[in-house]
Structures are given as C-alpha cells and as structure tokens.
Image (tube, rainbow, N blue to C red):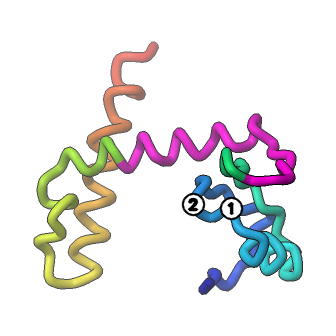
Amino acid sequence: MALPVNKPKALLADKGYDGDAVRTDLLIRGILPIIPPKANRREPIACDFRRYRDRNRIERMFGHLKHQRRIATRYDKTALSFASFLNLAAIRRWLPNFVNRA
C-alpha cells in the first residue's frame, strides 16, 4: 500500500480491508488501523467506532462532489485542470454554509 510522505496516525477503512496482513502491515508502520471486523471473523477485533464515524463524512463529501458530472466522469485531460474543478465544486458545496450567517 503506497502511503503519502507524511505518516498518518490512523487509517480509516471499510470491512473490505479487514485482513490480518493489512492490519499487521499498518501496525508495523506505526499506523493505527480503524477497520470494523467482518461478520465472519472468528475472533472479533475491537474497533473505535467513534473515530470510524469520520469516514462517513468523507464518503458523503465524495458523493456530493460526484453529482458534478465533470468530476464523476473525469473529462479533464490534465491533473491540474481536474484538481482545479474539484476545488470549485467543493467551494460551491460549502459556500451556502457561510453566506447570510450573521
């Protein structure tokens, strides 16, 4: 698993990543795995569901951004153009929260 330059403190993932190999690899790297156990796991592993709720926010944000057809289908040819439009879509999403709040 390729990781960014800055080492994260924890990794939020869904049940698809609930494997002993993934968990041990993350722990060896000093990253806390926050992954809920699969239903068919013989020995359930504790999960911090309070921190796991943050993953839902991220998934909802991606869902809102994918309502923009240009982002969902990735029409842009360059990474800079795609990232720029992604920023514009995020601003369009967050702007109503800041307008007329006096």
Q: How many residues crowd mark 1 within 10 Å: few (<14), some (14–19), many (20+)?
A: some
In terms of depth relative to the viewer, which is nearer, 75 or 41?
41
In terms of depth relative to the viewer, which is nearer, 49 or 60?
49
Q: Work out how far the residue at label 1 is from the one at label 2, CA to CA, in angstroms.
A: 6 Å
Q: Which quarter of the figure is the C terminus placed in?
A: top left
Q: Give the residue number, with chain letter if any, for mark 1.
A: 18
Left or right for 64, reference 47 = left
**What type is the residue that disc 1 sits on?**
Asp
Q: How many residues crowd mark 2 within 10 Å: few (<14), some (14–19), many (20+)?
A: few
Q: Is mark 2 on a helix, strand or loop?
A: helix
Q: How many labels does the image show?
A: 2
Image position, residue 48 (x, y; %):
81, 42
Q: Residue at x 84, y 81 (%)?
A: 29
Question: Quick check: is 32 in the magenta stretch?
Answer: no
- Name which quarter of the figure residue 77 lies in: bottom left
Q: Give the residue number, with chain letter if any, for mark 2.
A: 16
Contact between labelled residues 2 and 1, with CB atoms less than 8 Å apart: yes
Q: Main secondary structure of the magenta part?
A: helix
The label shown at residue 60 is none
Q: Residue at x 20, y 59 (%)?
A: 72
**What type is the residue that disc 2 sits on?**
Gly
- Name which quarter of the figure residue 5 lies in: bottom right
Image position, residue 50 (x, y; %):
76, 35
Residue range of the region highlighted in magenta in the rendering: 41-62
Q: Which residue is drawn at 54% across and 40% down?
A: 56
